Image (spheres, helix red, strand yellow):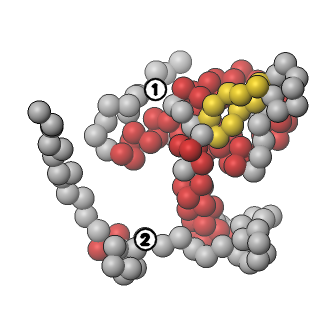
């Protein structure tokens, strides 16, 4: 089996985030957790994953602080997986991936659902990248620069 490269100490924030959520199974688990799934069996049934793969992915998501384990809400002996603030922070990532697919998929008519505002029932507006002053930004209008160094207190 090929050993996977670790990006944990990489200086690029995209590479670092891929260390935690960079495979499709993890993103699909997070998607289902955002929709309310909490139990191992629910994830396994909904995603059709092999139990050993699901177990490894859930453990990694817990280790990265994206999910936490908690006693089952029904008082049974089972444990549940709950999204942490870090896990809930993946919502815009999943929406961006969804919207990208809706725009560029070769067969968009096969996409069975749309994301809507629960209160109004209206489609969610496409995510936009905006400057601090509100201007819409394209990739050509952005760049990377070194982060200012942090001063150490004496």
Residue ID for mark 1: 4
What mark, if any, has residue 124 been given in the picture? none
Q: Is residue 139 left or right of residue 91?
A: left
Give how far apart the Cα atoms at labels 1 and 2 are.
32 Å
The C terminus, quarter of image: top left
Q: Badge 2 is on which residue?
A: 129
Q: Residue furthest left?
A: 154
The residue that appears at 60% across and 66% down in the rendered structure is 99
Q: Are discs 1 and 2 less than 8 Å apart at CB?
A: no
The quadrant holding residue 82 is top right
Q: Residue 122 appears at what percent x and percent y?
A: 74, 78
Q: Nearer the viewer, mark 1 or mark 2?
A: 2
Residue nearest the viewer, comparing 12 with 24: 12
On the image, the x and y values in percent for residue 28 come to 67, 44
Residue drawn at 62 percent across, 24 percent down: 59
At x 36%, y 81%, the residue is 135
Say which element carries label 1: loop
> Is residue 127 positioned above or below 92 on the image?
below
């Amino acid at each position: 089996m090929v050993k996977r490269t670790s990006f944990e100490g990489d200086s690029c924030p995209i590479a670092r985030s891929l260390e935690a959520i960079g495979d499709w199974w993890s993103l699909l688990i997070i998607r289902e957790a955002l929709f309310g799934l909490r139990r191992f069996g629910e994830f396994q049934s909904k995603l059709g994953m092999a139990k050993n793969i699901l177990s490894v992915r859930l453990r990694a998501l817990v280790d990265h602080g994206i999910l936490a384990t908690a006693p089952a809400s029904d008082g049974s002996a089972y444990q549940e997986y709950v999204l942490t603030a870090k896990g809930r922070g993946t919502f815009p990532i999943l929406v961006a991936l969804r919207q990208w697919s809706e725009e560029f998929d070769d067969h968009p008519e096969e996409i069975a659902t749309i994301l809507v505002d629960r209160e109004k029932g209206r489609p969610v507006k496409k995510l936009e990248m905006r400057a601090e002053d509100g201007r819409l930004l394209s990739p050509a209008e952005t760049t990377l620069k070194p982060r200012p160094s942090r001063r150490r207190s004496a």
